[in-house]
Amino acid sequence: MSDRFVPVKDAGELDELFARSQDEPVLLFKHDPVCPISARAHRQLQQMEAPVPLVDVANNKDLAQDVTDRTGVQHASPQVLVLRNGTAVWSASLHDITSDAVQQAVAQHSQA
């Protein structure tokens, strides 16, 4: 995993991301390290300028489910969410995850 990705290990760290979303858009990447589609999404997100918080869905299923419960966004893997004001304001999954789409979503919600 490159330095671009910041593992989210527990609910406390997830709480911090949701709290930070009150001030700025926050990315959250749900990644399965053994899935080839997720590997493609991972390569796309390596192009992001800011660090990308990452939930490893294969090794932390409970945390992945916690994200689903908190956001109401149906689980998919891979999946990227943009959090703003404590809610998911944008999401993409599978082949819809591109660096351009994610950057555009973050920019759009930076003005909120």
Image (cartoon, grey):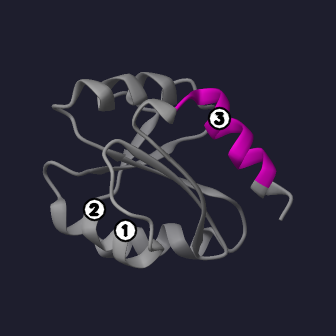
Closer to the observer: label 3 or label 2?
3
Secondary structure at numbered mark 3? helix
Q: Main secondary structure of the magenta part?
A: helix
Which quadrant of the rendered structure holds the N terminus? top left
In three-dimensional space, the C-alpha distance between marks 3 and 1, rounded to whole angstroms, equals 21 Å
Above or below, comparing residue 76 to residue 48 in the picture? below
Pick whichever of labels 3 and 2 is earlier in the sequence.
2
Task: Give the amino acid at mark 1.
Answer: Val
- Where's residue 81, x and y in %? 52, 54
Task: Give the amino acid at mark 2.
Answer: Ala
Contact (CB < 8 A) between labels 2 and 1? yes
Secondary structure at numbered mark 2? helix
**Can you identify the residue that label 2 sits on?**
64
Pick whichever of labels 3 and 1 is earlier in the sequence.
1
| Residue at image coords 33%, 59% | 75
Q: 37 or 107, which lies in front?
A: 37
Which quadrant of the rendered structure holds the C terminus? bottom right
**Can you identify the residue that label 1 sits on?**
67
| Residue at image coords 18%, 68% | 62
- Where's residue 25, x and y in %? 67, 58
Question: Quick one: label 1, few (<14), some, or many (20+) residues within 10 Å?
Answer: many
- Among the 4 quarters of the image, the one containing residue 87: bottom right
Contact (CB < 8 A) between labels 3 and 1? no
Instruction: Give the residues in magenta.
Output: 97-108
Q: Is residue 45 left or right of residue 108?
A: left
Q: For residue 81: magenta?
A: no
**Can you identify the residue that label 3 sits on?**
101
